[in-house]
């Protein structure tokens, strides 16, 4: 079974530029997550989709970050304009379900991440 | 507020020297506690899920246990290839979202 795919793997941009990340979840997984992981810290949830609807975006800096999941499969995360503090690894994860009655379906599987450096 | 604290921050072991990593948590209604392994430059790799106090899971040299306040990841006779950062996350019934700790960086020396 193919895992979570992400691209690009690395990105270097100047501050105030824009950047987009792409994620393809595990086939059949309804729930998709975007996390930000700053060096030395655990991942922090940015946004959670259930199919193509947003479940939780409470920690997404909406003045500069946006995300969409068209057709309930692939997703893109965009930053515009980027700041120095956005330098981090952006992880995509997916699960069969999220917040469902079947706890076993909530296990999240992560992609390799996109490493962003803002100069 | 749901919270996860992992200790120690870093751990160096000799090959074969067994030890334990700790994950202490505060959460409203634990739905699950998850252990992941993360190698440098890679995404977290799922290891275990624990759902209730007293539960134990094993995989090769790793054994995870759970109490009402904390979880331990026991590493028996570790090998250099066990070197990685081990992350703990909890899900509470209030939010249904993962809250991660900052991880334990494990280095096993040959």
Image (spheres, grey):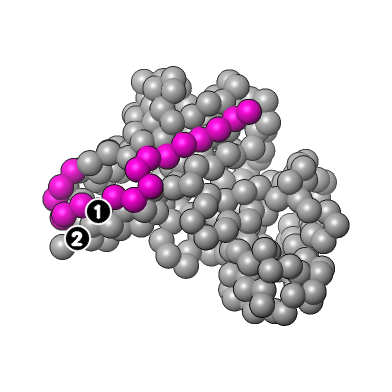
Range covered by the magenta-colored residues: B1-18
Which residue is nearer to you in this view: B109 or B33?
B109
Residues A51 and B83: in front is B83
Is B7 part of what is drawn in magenta? Answer: yes
Which quarter of the figure has residue A36? bottom right
Q: Nearer the viewer, mark 1 or mark 2?
A: 1
Picture coordinates of residue B29, whole percent (x, y): 58, 20
Instruction: Residue B6: say if magenta.
Output: yes
Residue B26 vs residue A100, the one in the foreground: B26
- Report the chain holding disc 1: B
Figure disc tally = 2
- Report whether A52 appears left or right of A105: right
A69 relative position to A116: left or right: right
Quarter the C terminus of chain B occupies? bottom left
Q: Residue at x 64, y 37 (%)?
A: B97
Residue A94 visible from this viewpoint: no
Residue at 32% x, 40% y is B21
Residue B12: mark: 1
Judging by the rendered image, the residue that carries numbered circle 2 is: B109
Position of residue B17 measured from the top left corner of the image (x, y, whole percent)? 15, 47
Query: Marks 1 and 2, Cα distance to the nearest angstrom?
Result: 7 Å
Asked if the residues shown at circle 1 and circle 2 are in contact, with their CB atoms under 8 angstroms apart, the answer is yes
Q: Residue at x 63, y 28 (%)?
A: B1
- Please report the residue visible at 47 percent of the width from the left and 67 percent of the height from the top: B41
**Secondary element type, mark 2:** strand
Whether labels 1 and 2 belong to a single chain: the reply is yes
**Residue A31 placed where, x, y %?**
69, 46
Q: Would you say A9 lies left or right of B21 here?
A: right
Chain letter behind tag 2: B
């Amino acid at each position: 079974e193919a895992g979570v795919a992400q691209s690009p793997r690395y990105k270097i941009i100047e501050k105030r530029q824009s950047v987009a990340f792409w994620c393809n979840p595990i086939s059949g997984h309804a729930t998709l997550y975007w996390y930000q992981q700053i060096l030395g810290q655990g991942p922090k949830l940015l946004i959670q989709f259930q199919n193509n609807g947003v479940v939780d975006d409470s920690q997404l800096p909406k003045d500069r970050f946006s995300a969409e999941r068209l057709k309930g499969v692939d997703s893109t995360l965009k930053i515009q304009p980027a700041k120095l503090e956005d330098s981090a690894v952006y992880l995509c994860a997916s699960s069969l379900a999220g917040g469902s009655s079947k706890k076993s379906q909530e296990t999240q599987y992560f992609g390799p991440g996109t490493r962003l450096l803002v100069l | 507020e749901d919270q996860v604290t992992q200790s120690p921050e870093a751990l160096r072991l000799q090959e074969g020297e067994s030890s334990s990593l700790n994950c202490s948590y505060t959460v409203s209604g634990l739905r699950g506690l998850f252990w992941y392994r993360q190698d440098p430059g890679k995404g977290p790799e799922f290891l275990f899920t624990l759902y209730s106090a007293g539960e134990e899971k094993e995989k090769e040299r790793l054994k995870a246990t759970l109490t009402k306040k904390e979880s331990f990841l026991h590493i028996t006779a570790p090998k250099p290839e066990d070197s990685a950062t081990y992350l703990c996350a909890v899900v509470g019934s209030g939010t249904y979202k993962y809250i991660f700790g900052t991880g334990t960086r494990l280095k096993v020396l040959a």
